[in-house]
């Protein structure tokens, strides 16, 4: 059971926009910044979003992040088949003094 | 460009000890938190623990009794040991570089992992 809650799967058609939610509590998302990771099969996760809404320079602006209270959201616009991957949210949990992740969301581009 | 190279035994028996090492190339070792994360087959990411260049550690409470993370700053390496292995420890193990700092204005922690190793598959089987 993951500390952060994500939907197991989401799907949308190419060109559309999809959002992935990540729900937590005061001790993690509520009081700390959130990051998002993209993972393709058989490869290591890659940082996608950090500090709630910042993108590493190599990440296109089709990817966006936001946070409100104890929930965070990853948005992907202009969906491409190459975006099919697993997406994880993560943050620091101040009560646990630990990094916590969501269970992951599998994105299917129909 | 920072790169993490990891290695260690991939096939172990129940009750044995897992030992993995991660070397940091091309960047500073100090100022970061160096983590181990694992991913069981078909499942999500599980953070195991972290260490900084001073040797200060934090562990996942569910694994703390069996885990030791150590650092060798002379070699820019950090290591993971997990003892008393069972089949449930079968997973891909990743090392990663973490950046953590405190936003004193908003009283929140920044944290993210921006560089990852390629992963080591560890199978525990008799």
Image (spheres, coloured by chain):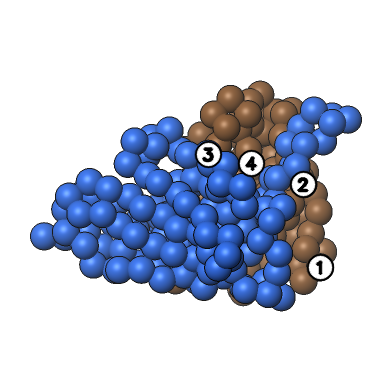
Question: Which callout, 3 or 1, points to the residue nearer the camera?
Answer: 3
Question: Which callout, 3 or 4, points to the residue nearer the camera?
Answer: 3
- Can you name the residue that lies furthest to the left here? B126
Residue highlighted by disc 3: B58
Residue at 37% over, 44% down: B67
Question: Position of B13 compared to B110: left or right?
Answer: left
Residue highlighted by disc 2: A51
Give the chain ID for the brown colour. A
Cα separation, mark 3 vs mark 1, equals: 30 Å
- Are tags 2 and 3 found on a single chain? no
- Residue A57: which numbered mark, if any? 1
Question: Residue B62's quadrant in the figure?
Answer: top left
Cα separation, mark 1 vs mark 4, equals: 20 Å
Give the chain ID for the blue colour. B
Q: Chain of mark 4?
A: A
- Residue B118 placed where, x, y %? 50, 71
N-terminal of the two: label 2 or label 1?
Answer: 2
**In which quadrant is the N terminus of chain B drawn?**
bottom right
Q: Classify mark 2: helix, strand or loop.
A: loop
Q: Residues within 10 Å of mark 2 (few under 14, many from 20)?
A: some
In terms of depth relative to the viewer, which is nearer, A79 or B29?
B29
């Amino acid at each position: 059971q993951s500390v952060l809650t994500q939907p197991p799967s989401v799907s949308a058609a190419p060109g559309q926009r999809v959002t992935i939610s990540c729900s937590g509590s005061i001790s993690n998302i509520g009081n700390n910044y959130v990051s998002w990771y993209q993972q393709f099969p058989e490869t290591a996760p890659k940082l996608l979003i950090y500090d709630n809404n910042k993108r590493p320079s190599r990440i296109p602006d089709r990817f966006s992040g936001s946070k409100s209270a104890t929930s965070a959201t990853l948005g992907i616009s202009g969906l491409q088949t190459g975006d099919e991957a697993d997406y994880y949210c993560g943050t620091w949990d101040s009560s646990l003094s630990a990094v916590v992740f969501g269970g992951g969301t599998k994105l299917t581009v129909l | 460009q920072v790169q993490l190279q990891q290695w260690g035994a991939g096939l172990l028996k129940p009750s044995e000890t897992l030992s993995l090492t991660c070397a940091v190339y091309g960047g500073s070792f100090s100022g970061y938190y160096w983590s181990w994360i694992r991913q069981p087959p078909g499942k999500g990411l599980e953070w195991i623990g972290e260490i900084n260049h001073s040797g200060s550690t934090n562990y996942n409470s569910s694994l703390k009794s069996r885990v030791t993370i150590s650092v060798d700053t002379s070699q820019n390496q950090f290591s993971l040991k997990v003892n008393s292995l069972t089949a449930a420890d079968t997973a891909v193990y990743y090392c990663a570089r973490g950046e953590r700092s405190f936003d004193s204005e908003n009283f929140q922690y920044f944290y993210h992992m921006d560089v990852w190793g390629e992963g080591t598959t560890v199978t525990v089987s008799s």
